[in-house]
Image (tube, rainbow, N blue to C red):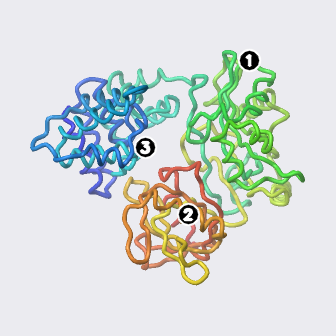
Amino acid sequence: MPLSDVVTASTEVGRTRSRLAKVAALSGLLHRARGPEEVEIAVAFLSGTPRQGRVGVGWRTLRAATGAPAASATLTAAGVDAALTALAGASGKGSAGVRAELLERLMGAATEAEQRFLVALLTGELRQGALEGVMLEAIATAAEVPSAAVRRAFMLSGGLPATARAALAGGVAALEGFRLELHRPVRPMLASPGSSLQEAVADLAPCAVEYKLDGARIQVHKGGGRVSVYTRTLREITGSVPELVELVAGLPCESVVLDGETLALTDDGRPRPFQETMSRFGSTAEEQVAALLLRPWFFDCLHLDGEDLLDEPLRVRGEKLRAAAGGHLVPGVLAPTAEQAEELTEAALAAGHEGVVVKSLDSAYAAGRRGKAWQKVKPVHTLDLVVLAAEWGHGRRTGYLSNLHLGARDPDGGPPVMVGKTFKGLTDQLLQWQTEEFPAHESHRDDWAVHLKPAVVVEIALDGVQVSTRYPGQVALRFARVVRYRPDKTPAEASTIDEVRALLPR
């Protein structure tokens, strides 16, 4: 497959806001792929993540390696994939020169359009709209299989390229061959915002109501004599959390996969700031581990002693959870009355947590999906939005990047949709941090602001939304203020424009 075909499909996807048109462009390209290997490579490139992952090439290196473009297109997708494998494997003495030579040869053989594509791909900035949901639909269309079969296989495989390869090579039978595998993380099930506690409890009855902890999502796997710990983005952090590894290793079972949250507590038992918990995920320093111990609270069990539980209802998974990790469960109540649900919510808030999650006891574990079977209820609305730009401050904030431009995710894969601005909630520490951090994500700047590529997600509290013609989304946030930044989330996990519009007064 010529690389130019991949670049053309990427351009077509980026030019349209139509989900159908995106799916058509992507599925058309997959139809033209010759063999499973080309399918994997094309899906990896169009999703913005090469099969080799990050190959350690930065802007400066790429700029130095990028000379005059080739006059005609000669590169193939497979050839580029092989070059990236060589780049990723170059190490040791003399590797810098080898990597530079490989890059110069690759970029020198690329046309101008291919150079732009490769630079975006290698720097993680390829955001033309081939988001997971769109790509999954394209795979289903190209393979002529049900979307549900593709989504389930993706949930279990954890990778779009492998899912696409199976779908186009073996159809439904190959997709059904994916199973939960110990030490291969499963995409987490997500909760949708609930309008009120009373409505959520009524809609999902019979249900469970649990604390919504202000912690970091974790998934732990135990089996084969070892323990693995993963974040919500499926990044392994086992080496950074020895206290969690020790605790899970001691659970009364041979093999288990648990979903939950972890956080650090103050001396009086209240949750420490989210950023402090997250700081542990990148550190293996013994002194930091000792100073900031993490505790886990589990709320779901996906596997126990050889039995996969994804398709079992929550009531059954809950029984297995209590058997495996009974002393480390998120506080909650089963089938509560309205009064019991209110009491639990008040207790959660009094303990310093965010609110509660209401879960249908009949629901299966829908990994990677934000369905209505789980609904989170908080005392104030919060949204995870993408920072589009930051304006230079005035007065006391002169010299600092301050007022944030906020965007919601386009579920059809287009660029984030602006829904408002805010400078409220920004502490001196956050002002300092974003002034230092934002230039690393800069796309361009003017006299008033630094504009960012979609990279930074911030949690925003708000009193509601209102209809507005001021912003492209036709809605505006009311009394928005910064709660915290979310380094555990990517722009692909930000709140959608549909979620924002759902907060409009009925």
Q: Seen from this angle, which residue lies furthest bottom?
A: 395
Q: Is residue 361 left or right of residue 183?
A: right
Name the residue nearer the viewer: 305 or 435. 435
Inter-mark Cα distance, 1 to 3: 34 Å
Query: Which amino acid, by three-letter code, is at mark 2?
Result: Gln
Q: Secondary structure at mark 3?
A: helix
Q: Nearer the viewer, mark 2 or mark 1?
A: 2
Distance from disc 2 to disc 1, alpha carbons, whole Å, reads 45 Å
* Residue 489 at x, y percent in the picture: 56, 50
Where in the figure is residue 491, as x and y percent of width and height? 48, 53
Q: Quadrant of the C terminus?
A: bottom right
Residues at badges 1 and 3 in contact (C-beta under 8 Å)? no
| Label located before the other in sequence (3 or 2) | 3
15 lies left or right of 265: left
Q: What residue did someone put label 1 on?
A: 254
Camera-nearest residue between 79 and 284: 284
What's the residue type where badge 1 is placed?
A: Glu
From what the image shows, is residue 292 above or below residue 90? below
Label 3 crowd bin: few (<14), some (14–19), many (20+), radius 10 Å: some
Q: Amino acid at mark 3?
A: Glu
Task: Identify which residue is drawn at 32% across, 37% down.
Answer: 141
The secondary structure type at the circle numbered 2 is helix
Disc 3 marks which residue?
132
Label whose residue precedes the other's in the sequence (2 or 1):
1
Q: Check disc 2 and report the residue beneath it.
A: 434
**Residue placed most toward the observer, 439 or 409:** 439
